[in-house]
Amino acid sequence: MRLSHLLRHCSVGAIVRGPTYLMTVKDIREWKEPLGEVLRYVDRVRGALGISQTLREPPTARSIPAVRFPFWTRCLNSECGLLYYKPWQDRGEGDKPRCIGCAKRSEVEQVPWILVHAAGSMADVPWHFLAHADARQPAQKKCKPNDAHPYLRLRDQKGSQRRLRCDRCGAESTFSEATPVLFGKEPRQPWCHDLCIETLEGSAEIVEINDVRVHTPVTRNALVIPPESRVRKGSVVDRLYRSSQKMRLLSQARTPLAKKSALRQIASAFRCSMEAVEEAQHAIAQGYPNHDEHGTDLLLGSEYLAFLNEWPDMGDDEDFVTQHQTTAWQSLKTHFQEGTRQHRMITVVNHLVAVNRIREIMVLKGFNRLGGDTLVPPDIVGESDWLPAIELYGEGVFFSLHEEWLRPWESLPAVRNQADSFRRRCQDASLRVDPSLDVNPRFLLLHTLSHLLIRQMETQAGYPAASLRERIYCGVGKPPMSGILVYIAVSDVMGSLGGLAELATPNRFLSLLSGVFDHADWCSLDPVCSKHEGQGPGLMNRAACHACALIPESSCTFGNILLDRTFLKGNPATGLPAFLDTIG
């Protein structure tokens, strides 16, 4: 599997479908040596994400341990339905287990149901307990579980009904996913052999293995920006910073003579002077590579300022390479009459930046289940000194909207009322929404605009929408933010081929933006889509459907919700003006 999958839907605790059976990925305590390389020049990323652990690449996918799960299987013969516990034990890898309880000798297949708790635990369904839940006779109540020999049957009946039966005592019950089950003192995860200290509070749920609530990876992404991105790879200070062994050699030198010997040894290895090594050691002691950093401590805030800043003497080999197109963009206004749609689009875009190269860090912080608030760390126990992370390289287009026009628009009563309806739904919905997200007019406008731009790049520039991603910079604090980054990033140090950044040239971007606003005005499902009061998960979208504003789930940061084209096209029925009509 791809390393990016190992940090998302195939990460620790997830159920992965292999060629012949289902399995779940074990926690990082059991990941085999040698582990991947430590990621360097990510101190700002770790600080902004609140991570104290070292970030390390996973080992190759072939070295990732997993365990076959669910452990229970069922005979595929509908008339039999005999349940087996780990029938693959003591068999060859290619020897498929078959049922010994029916004449057809049918194959057995892992059951599609598991037991999941909101605290993050996962286990097999307690089939013996469910089969005897309605037991009335003394013999049935005394029947004890025995996984060594099959005796339970799960048969499908008419409709969606299923019956569980114990062949030993005759106990029967109806199997339903809605049956509440206490998790009990079972292993917290299928591969953990240590038992729970005490019973988990609340009932667990029986869910199908393909239920999205079984496993939700919690990943965080951040861009590497100056000064960390400006490090000259291969320099003396870079090589010393990357070598923990040589840094340890210097730190262990207690006397002047020992230090001189260590400097001479390192200088010989680096083929440089001892003075250069000493200067590099001093730079690291002063906080290299972050001692010259200025700006905000906020993750998105510092990235936003990095895009707005024109960095001097930027080299093509840096990890954050931008080319500002703002002056050329603003000069396009002379080609259009004031008041025209193109003139207004040029006026409202305050900055336009071609992002020729970016380095993104993706970190797996853990996972949760059933939408619970419990974050289970990648090592389960929360004692590991490292977290799995990968580097992604790519390019993109960044632009921001002008505060001079954005602030009056978001203060209009009709605009605020429309945004308030989204805010109330976020508070009332059972859908999990980041509580730190400020659902305001500015965010709803930027998010919808980002989706429409991605769709326009797909139709006009030939980029598959699933390969593009968004990063929304929104805030009314200091600095106020109103920016959008649409980018592509892959796990290859060379990144992509430069075609996406070329879309930031003024004429091409104006063509894209014109198509975006044309697309916002009309959807093939209008007038139904435009007049919709709520659609999508938790009714968190209004004028946004698969024909206009929705994009692949992998491209959207917020789960394809909080979208509404009327913020761009307006709605005369509610007095909501079209966004461009408010631009002078």
Image (cartoon, helix red, strand yellow):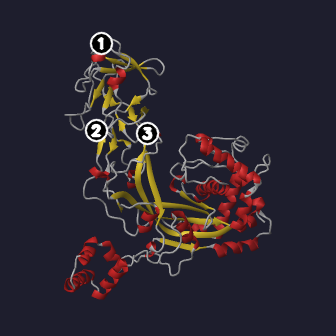
Q: Which x, y percent locates residue 392?
A: 43, 62
Vertical comparison of 528 with 564: above or below:
above
User: Does the residue at mark 2 contact the one at mark 1 (Cβ under 8 Å)?
Assistant: no
Figure quadrant of residue 473: bottom right
Q: What residue type is labelled 2?
A: Leu
Tell me which residue sits at (69%, 66%) in the image: 403
The quadrant of the picture occupied by the C terminus is bottom right
- Binning the other alpha carbons within 10 Å of mark 3 as few (below 14), some (14 to 19) or many (20 upward) gives many
**First in sequence: mark 3 or mark 2?**
3
**First in sequence: mark 2 or mark 1?**
1
Q: Does 24 sit left or right of 530 as displayed?
A: left
Q: Name the residue under label 2.
A: 195
In the drawing, what numbered circle is on residue 138?
Answer: 1
Q: What element carries label 3?
A: loop
- Nearer to me, 251 or 312: 251
Tell me which residue sits at (55%, 40%) in the image: 430
Q: What residue type is labelled 1?
A: Pro
Whole-Å distance between the Cαs marked 2 and 1? 30 Å
Q: Does 339 sit left or right of 108 as displayed?
A: right
User: Does the residue at mark 3 contact the one at mark 1 (Cβ under 8 Å)?
Assistant: no
Whole-Å distance between the Cαs marked 3 and 1? 35 Å
Whole-Å distance between the Cαs marked 3 and 2? 17 Å
- Binning the other alpha carbons within 10 Å of mark 2 as few (below 14), some (14 to 19) or many (20 upward) gives few
Figure quadrant of residue 169: top left
Q: Which x, y percent locates residue 271?
A: 27, 84
Tell me which residue sits at (46%, 39%) in the image: 370
